[in-house]
């Protein structure tokens, strides 16, 4: 027998994601993934890792999420929600792999943490102003780091070293919720910690 045509099953959609070789060891089968489709930016879709390629490929500049010269592993994500009326094969999507999901922990913006004499520190606000305090850190993502010891919730910390004039500090992105005037922020509970990637369906 010879096939006349192939009809795709749009009720079971897959997303192909290029994951760098440095991040690939953290990706596991059945790991939860959050998917944002470029054409449907107001909705987040959910999926799970269904396959991880065992062979690395060279980065292709024509592929989304791929960097020339870097090795990538193709990861397949099975979408849990499939709406053939809005999701079409070939659409571009961004994927966030939930590598670690923590609850009831304290976290601060990465830019608030400094290293001095081998010690990890933040500047904590008191009645006399900001002072250094040593902290013990844990897991981190691209924006935040867990504080295991040294801070309590709702203490106010500086986003930058207040002992260095602003014109001598390197420009950086302002953390969500940070104040422009004082550059301080309250320590907060940690949200889910995703690892990002880009892909095409």
Image: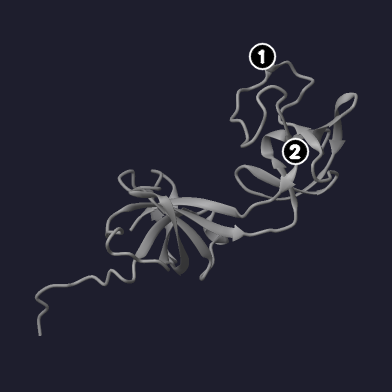
Of discs 1 and 2, which sits in the foreground? 2
Q: Residue furthest right?
A: 128
User: Within the image, what quadrant is residue 17 found in?
Assistant: bottom left
Indicate whether 20 appears above or below 143.
Answer: below
Q: Secondary structure at mark 1?
A: helix
Circles 1 and 2 in contact, beta carbons < 8 Å: no
Q: Position of residue 12 (x, y in %)?
A: 34, 71
Which residue is depicted at the point 77% across and 22% down? 162
Q: CA distance from mark 1 to mark 2?
A: 24 Å
Which residue is depicted at the point 17% across and 72% down? 6
Q: Residue furthest bottom?
A: 1
- Which colour assignment does the render follow? one colour
Give the mark count: 2
Q: Nearer the viewer, residue 56 or 131?
A: 131
Which residue is depicted at the point 60% across and 27% down? 172
Which residue bears the numbered disc 2? 186
Which residue is depicted at the point 48% across and 67% down? 48
Can residue 120 be seen from the camera position used here? no
Mark 1 burial class by Cα count in 10 Å: few <14, some 14-19, many 20+: few
Q: Position of residue 192 (x, y in %)?
A: 62, 55
Q: Earlier in the sequence, mark 1 or mark 2?
A: 1
Quadrant, the C terminus:
bottom left
Indicate whether 90 appears above or below 109.
Answer: below
User: Within the image, what quadrant is residue 35 found in?
Assistant: bottom left
Indicate whether 98 appears above or below 1.
Answer: above
Which residue bears the numbered disc 1? 167
Q: Position of residue 67 (x, y in %)?
A: 41, 44
Quadrant, the N terminus:
bottom left
Q: Position of residue 93 (x, y in %)?
A: 38, 52
127 vs 33, left or right, is right
């Amino acid at each position: 027998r010879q096939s006349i045509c192939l009809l795709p099953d749009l009720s079971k959609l897959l997303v192909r994601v290029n994951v760098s070789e440095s991040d690939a060891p953290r990706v596991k089968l059945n790991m939860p993934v959050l998917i944002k489709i470029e054409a449907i930016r107001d909705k987040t879709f959910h999926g799970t890792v269904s396959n991880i390629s065992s062979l690395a490929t060279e980065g292709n500049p024509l592929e989304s999420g791929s960097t020339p010269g870097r090795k990538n592993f193709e990861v397949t994500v099975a979408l849990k929600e499939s709406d053939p009326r809005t999701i079409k094969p070939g659409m571009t999507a961004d994927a966030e792999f939930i590598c670690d999901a923590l609850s009831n922990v304290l976290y601060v913006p990465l830019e608030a943490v400094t290293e001095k004499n081998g010690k990890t520190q933040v500047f904590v606000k008191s009645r006399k102003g900001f002072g250094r305090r040593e902290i013990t850190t844990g897991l981190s993502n691209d924006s935040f780091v867990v504080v295991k010891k040294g801070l309590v919730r709702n203490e106010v910390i500086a986003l930058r070293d207040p002992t260095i004039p602003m014109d001598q500090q390197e420009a950086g992105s302002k953390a969500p919720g940070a104040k422009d005037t004082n550059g301080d922020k309250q320590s907060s509970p940690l949200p889910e910690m995703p690892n990002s990637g880009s892909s095409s369906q």
